[in-house]
Amino acid sequence: MSSSALPAVRFAPITDPTRQHAFFWAAPAEAFDALLATWDRDEELTAEPFEFTDPRIVNEMRSWLADAQQESGRPATVMVGSVENGQWVKWNLETVPRPPVPAF
């Protein structure tokens, strides 16, 4: 798939009230509002826009989302990784080094 055919991607951390736990999700831009709305239904969780600035993360996620969308036939969301108590505990991009833990 050419890079021009890859979807624009947006990111959101989903956090608990203490902000000690966060799950970073990615969604195609056209499905981003639905991602936020889905998570905001839970009173215990907060979902908000976030930007990864490393182009390797953005490009890898664009490719992953395109593959997921091709398989399912609809926009998909995927978990980039999760943070607990200021440390990455899960990072789903094997070819991209973990960035410093983002402030959120």
Image: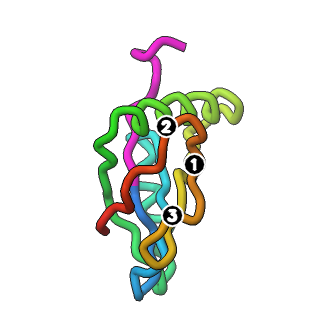
Check if mark 3's residue and mark 1's residue have beta carbons within 8 Å: no
Q: Amino acid at mark 1?
A: Val
Q: Residue 99: which disc?
A: none
N-term mark: 3 or 2? 2
Q: Residue 61: which disc?
A: 2
Disc number lying in front (3 or 2): 3
N-term mark: 3 or 1? 1
- Report crowding for label 1: few under 14, some 14 to 19, many 20 or more residues within 10 A (C-alpha): some
Location of mark 1 (residue): 78
Q: Amino acid at mark 2?
A: Met
- Direction top: furthest residue: 2
What is the CA distance from the residue labelled 2 to the residue labelled 1?
8 Å
The quadrant of the image that shows the N terminus is: top right
> Which residue is at a point 46% across and 79% down the rendered structure image?
85
Image position, residue 32 (x, y; %) = 41, 50
Check if mark 2's residue and mark 1's residue have beta carbons within 8 Å: yes
SS type, badge 3: strand
Location of mark 3 (residue): 88
What is the CA distance from the residue labelled 3 to the residue labelled 1?
16 Å
> Which residue is at a point 49% across and 33% down the rendered structure image?
60
Q: Quadrant of residue 48?
A: bottom left
Q: Amino acid at mark 3?
A: Trp
What segment carries the magenta color?
1-11
84 lies above or below 78: below
> Which residue is at a point 69% across and 35% down the rendered structure image?
72
SS type, badge 2: helix
